[in-house]
Amino acid sequence: MSKPDNIKIPLPLLTQTIDLLQNWNLADYDPSVQYDYDCVYYALLKKRQSLELRDAYAKVIFAENEDARHSAKMNYLQQKRQFNDDF
């Protein structure tokens, strides 16, 4: 493979996959499997948070009035801060 291809998966499938991974107990697995699991799990979490952040930004852009825009912007900034703190 020369470069990674991007694919689209439905958001419910992404959420279901994250939920499934979250409930797996890897205590008896080899540390290399645990490392791979962590890489996949956190990459999917990051992708979901990125999508949520993009949605929050869209609410700022498409707000109906200034009050709604201000509220949406505060929500976006809070989510962005949380995203940056998590990763």
Image (spheres, rainbow, N blue to C red):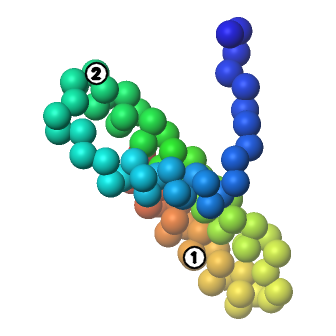
Q: Nearer the viewer, residue 10 or 69?
A: 10
* Real-space Cα separation, disc 2 to disc 1, in angstroms: 41 Å
Q: Image check: 14 left or right of 64? A: left
Neighbour class for label 1 at 10 Å: few (<14), some, many (≥20)?
some
Residue 82 percent across, percent down from the top left: 44, 61
Q: Position of residue 24 (x, y in %)?
A: 31, 48
**Image mark count:** 2
Chain-order first, disc 2 or disc 1: 2
Residue at (82, 75) in percent of width and height: 62
Looking at the image, residue 16 lies above or below residue 61: above
Q: Nearer the viewer, residue 61 or 32?
A: 32
Q: In this rendering, does residue 54 appear at all?
A: yes
Residue 33's quadrant in the figure?
Answer: top left
Task: Name which residue lies at 22% across and 24% down.
Answer: 30
Residue 86 in the image: x percent, y percent?
39, 52
Q: Is residue 35 left or right of residue 18?
A: left
Q: Which mark is residue 32?
A: 2
Depicted 83 relative to depicted 25: above or below:
below
- What residue did someone put label 1 on? 74
Q: Residue at x 22, y 30 (%)?
A: 29
- Local crowd size for mark 2, using a 10 Å CA cut-off: few (<14), some (14–19), many (≥20): few
- Which quadrant: the C terminus? top left
